[in-house]
Image (cartoon, grey):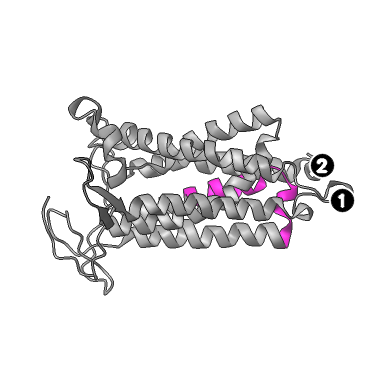
Amino acid sequence: MTYCPPSFDLIDPVLLSIPEIFGIGPFPIRWYALAYIAGLFGGLFWMMRLVSRGALWGTTVKTQVAPYSRAFVDDLVLWVMLGVIGGGRLGHVLFYNTSMIWEDPVRVFTGITQGGMSFHGGLIGVTLAMVFAARAHGAPILRVADAVAAATPIGLFLGRLANFINGELWGRPAPELPWAMQFTGDPDCLLRHPSQLYEAFLEGWVLFTILTVLIYRFRALSRPGYVTGVFLAGYGLFRALVELVREPDRQMPEALQGYVTMGMLLCIPMIATGAYLIWRACNRPDAGQA
């Protein structure tokens, strides 16, 4: 790995390391792993808060109750956690680093604590987890997805900050910008866009704010699928926008390099699905009763 002196106060990706015990170890505790843990607990707290406010979910007095219990949310978060980790890691390998499967198959699993997670893979994993949990408990899937979507920007915000601390997923060269940065591992040692921070702001803070305003000001949870649709379309648009200044994917076919990135391609179905869910939620006459 090429070492470039970082142009910001470097935060060690390893918070602390537990020393070797009985010949086993040491055990590094990384900011990246802590970001995922904090994101899951932050998401659990926010979902519990939404479920405890039944008036957010219905349009009439009779329907002012959450469609599932806090106990269901506890079970759901466990399945979501497995979906995020399993889907995120497999998505990274399949979408961005396929050669790892035959070149270093062990690292498919052991390299997870050092980075290398795909949001789109995690999205697929979480979707499967939600479907399984909803069917097992008889909960309406769109209502489940709406609560998960409302909480997901919390994890995205923390995850992108962890990407920044890891010095990975940096942006394209931008030496003219006063906030451009160098990142350890960049073979060219160029000043680049801190695209991780752009994504933390847009996919995390901005998207969370939009969803929260829609939920509390415009009663978006009373229309099943609406919050999910806004999340999918919003994330897809924000991610595609940041991809314009993010370092392009090297594994893309040469004919496409310089025009689109893998992130952009994966966002297209997200935006289309989000737009459909928004349209569906706004045109269902029984939206508040579903």
- Whether residue 171 is visible here, answered yes or no, is no
Write the residue at 63% across / 43% down: 73
Can I make out residue 3 in this image?
yes
Nearer to us in this view, 163 or 197: 163
Image position, residue 218 (x, y; %): 72, 59
**Quarter-wise, where is residue 260 in the image?**
top left
Instruction: Specify whether 267 is left or right of 101.
Output: right
Q: Which of marks 2 and 1 is nearer the N terminus?
A: 1
Residue indicated by mark 2: 289
Spatial CA distance of label 2 from label 1 is 9 Å
Res. 92 image quadrant = top left
Q: Position of residue 127 (x, y in %)?
A: 54, 35
**What residue is rendered at 75% in x and 46% in y?**
66
- Give the structural element (helix, strand or loop) at label 2: helix
Residue 42 is a magenta residue: no
- Of residues 255 and 108, the one nearer the viewer is 108
Question: Tag 1: residue type?
Answer: Thr
Q: Which of 252 and 289 is in front in this view?
A: 289
Which span is picked out in magenta? 217-236
- The number of callouts visible is 2
Disc 1 crowd, CA 10 A, few/some/many (<14, 14-19, 20+) = few
- Going by the picture, which residue comes out furthest to the front? 22
For residue 229: magenta?
yes
Q: Name the residue under label 1.
A: 60
Residues packed near mark 2 inside 10 Å, few (<14), some (14 to 19) or many (20 plus): some
126 versus 212 height, above or below: above
Q: Looking at the picture, which amino acid does disc 2 mark?
A: Gln
Q: Is the magenta stretch mostly helix, strand or loop?
A: helix
Give the residue at x 20% y 68%: 175
Q: Is residue 5 left or right of residue 74?
A: left
Which SS class for mark 1? Answer: loop
